[in-house]
Amino acid sequence: MEEGSSSVSSFLLRCGSIITGIVSFALGLLYYKQDSLLYFPEIGGVPKRPGSNPRRYRSPSEYNIPYESHMIPTSDGASIHCWLLLHPSSASETRKKPTILFFHGNAGNIGLRLPNAVQMYHKLQANIALVEYRGFGDSSDHIPSEAGLKLDAEAALHFIHSYWIEKLCTSNIYIFGRSLGGAVGFHLAQYAERNNISLSGLMVENTFLSIGKMVDVIMPFVAPFKALILRINWDSESIAPFLNLPVLYLAGAKDQLVPHKQMLALYKKSKAGNKSHPKTHMHVIANGTHNESWLQVRVFFAVNA
């Protein structure tokens, strides 16, 4: 009987060691591969580069909109691609119009956002700077990362403020970010305030509190280990209460990816913050899903011209 018990114990120990090894391997893989689980320069059958997209997703020229294409250098040697959609008016009139820095989500190139950008261009009468992160679209092939995307956003803002100072009104710049782009926007707004760079406002759509909070939702089995393995933060909830500029929250009530309550929580943190701006608002889009909330809004929001 003792020999049988010993065999069972030995078997269980071996099983435990194997399970521990598998779990350790899986967690190690998540630690080293988590960037590739968040950033998707290519999705499905959609090409990586905008020029290879289906019609109406290739270039602003397909919408008869004047634009300029630029490669913006970053402080760490990458180059990011940007389309700048400009209103065809005199230099003085162009300078009076607001400029929106548009930061996209975690998948696909900027061409996929053209219909939305064109709508904003016309309805808001704003110049639109569509920014493409490193590793995405026509930007340089540097591997996307949180640190890298933050540098991309900072470079885009400096580009608007310096290179285009002769054409654009640098005192009337707004940031817009959807999903991951919202987290990029929060970082950039904080960066601008810390460096005394003028911004008129931040607009975020269907973004999240932090990557840690999203892990709780999407990968609950990993949640107990996230303190050990999570290298990506995008911690917008720690930034929101301390911004001293107006923030517009656009929240799809039927968002199937980011829980709607995370947008509500971000808004509440903004309003409760010591530096909360009185013009901070939330607009809930009743039928808005994660990617298509903008299609549900018939009347968009005017920004100060």
Image (spheres, helix red, strand yellow):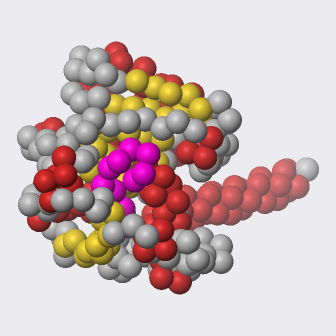
Up/down of 12 relative to 272, above or below: below
Q: x%, y% of residue 185?
A: 33, 46
Q: Quadrant of residue 304?
A: top left
Q: Residue at x 21, y 55 (%)?
A: 94
Q: x%, y% of residue 178?
A: 46, 48
Q: x%, y% of residue 63?
A: 48, 68
Q: Residue furthest bottom?
A: 52
Q: x%, y% of residue 73?
A: 19, 73
Camera-side residue of 248 and 193: 248
Camera-side residue of 138 and 232: 138
Q: Residue at x 33, y 37 (%)?
A: 303
Residue 142 shown left or right of residue 275 in the figure = right
Up/down of 203 relative to 27, above or below: above
Segment colored magenta:
121-132
Q: Residue at x 44, y 46 (%)?
A: 123
Q: Is residue 155 magenta?
A: no
